[in-house]
Amino acid sequence: MKLLEYQAKAILCEAGLPVPKSELVTSPDQVESALEKLGITVGVIKAQVYTGGRGKAGGVKLFKSVEEAKQMAEEIIGMTLVTHQTGPAGVKVESVILEEASDIARELYVAFLVDRSRSSVAAMISPEGGMDIETVASETPEKILKIYPQVGSPVSAEACKKASDFLSLEGDLADQLADVLNRMFDVFQAKDCSLLEINPLVVTGDNKLALVDCKFAIDENALFRQKDVDGDPNAEKSDAEIEAAKYDMSYIQLDGNIGCMVNGAGLAMATMDIILTKGAQPANFLDVGGSATEEAITKAFNIITSDSNVKAILVNIFGGIMKCDIIANGVLNAVKTTGLKVPLVVRLEGTNVKQGREIIENSGLEITFAENMADGAEKAAAAIQ
């Protein structure tokens, strides 16, 4: 679950980190009182959306007067912000923050994340703040330092010294960095974060560190422990993803035209791969799980066919806990309910496969059977030619 900037900064501020003062506003009418509360007339206005690249898209601007701030709020609130991360559809801006401007002398980068390859938390440090870290990593990897703090312990003095040397920070600034790293690490652990990124972490003109912008993501598997965090776990999900989750199914829409319904994440990945080998493109990842009901199967078909790009459907089920006869009845019910108008290829294997096949064969519906995964992918690809 991602947090908006104002939500993330409230947590960081409470943790004692140096965050610029800001106020959230949802209407231009609130701008003047917010600036009075902040005691500023010059500052930054930032769109509150779950995406990067806001500045280039016109979602972050510097204002130099109250009237200018009001005008910018009118322009930004309600606009559709299109960035390289949102795609052409963009996202609607519902609110902005007004923030005191920082006197930026240098821009740095600091992030804590889960390094799954090492089963460890990693801190990434770079002097290239303000840049896309992916670009830095690919073009100048030598400008990224990784340190691996021990969970449950402070970031070691040795690791902090290594980080400050890498960033060419000395004296009081080095001490400030050590404090920032430790407080960030505390927040990362306490809030079950999967990512806590500060970009940029700035050095101000009077040699102070300030966390000017941030990304804050909480592991969804730990949300039951983070009920006090004000965030929306469905904020970036499509209606189809939200509907699938109600039935304990995992759905992700893709760009292809063969809809996939599979039980098991590994089998779903293999199904998408084999579709690609047949020269076709999967339209989705859809794992109905190991114990889906007939109702859930019907819902899965509804979700798949809601994508107008789907020109054929491949059902690939390996029956274990999920019995093939239940799948077969669910498929028939779904076909009748949805009035399916695209070719349907079904591959069943495992528990009660004979019964499942007989149910479909005796239905009189136009359903193509596949003998195995490769055969199913080939028949689905041929159906859209």
Image: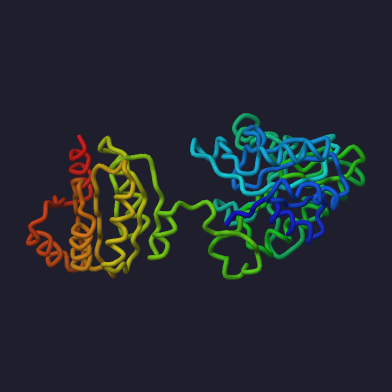
Q: Position of residue 340 (x, y in %)?
A: 21, 51
Residue at 40% over, 58% down: 250
Please indicate whether residue 289 sits to the left or right of residue 38 in the image.
Answer: left
Q: Nearer the viewer, residue 37 or 298?
A: 37
Q: Is residue 18 above or below residue 228?
A: above
* Quadrant of the snapshot with the N terminus: bottom right
* Quadrant of the snapshot with the C terminus: top left
Residue at 9% over, 63% down: 358
Asked whether residue 141 is in view, the answer is no
Residue at the farthest top position: 139
Q: Position of residue 3 (x, y in %)?
A: 63, 54
Q: Position of residue 25 (x, y in %)?
A: 72, 51
Count the marks: how many?
Answer: 0
Q: Nearer the viewer, residue 190 or 277?
A: 190
Please indicate whether residue 303 sits to the left or right of residue 54 in the image.
Answer: left
Please indicate whether residue 321 sits to the left or right of residue 31 in the image.
Answer: left
Q: Nearer the viewer, residue 184 or 19?
A: 19
Q: Is residue 226 above or below residue 380?
A: below
Residue at the farthest front position: 29
Colour setup of the view: rainbow
Residue at 75% over, 36% down: 127
Q: Nearer the viewer, residue 59 or 168?
A: 59
The quarter of the picture where residue 162 lies is top right
Q: Position of residue 332 (x, y in %)?
A: 18, 61
Asked whether residue 379 is in view, the answer is yes
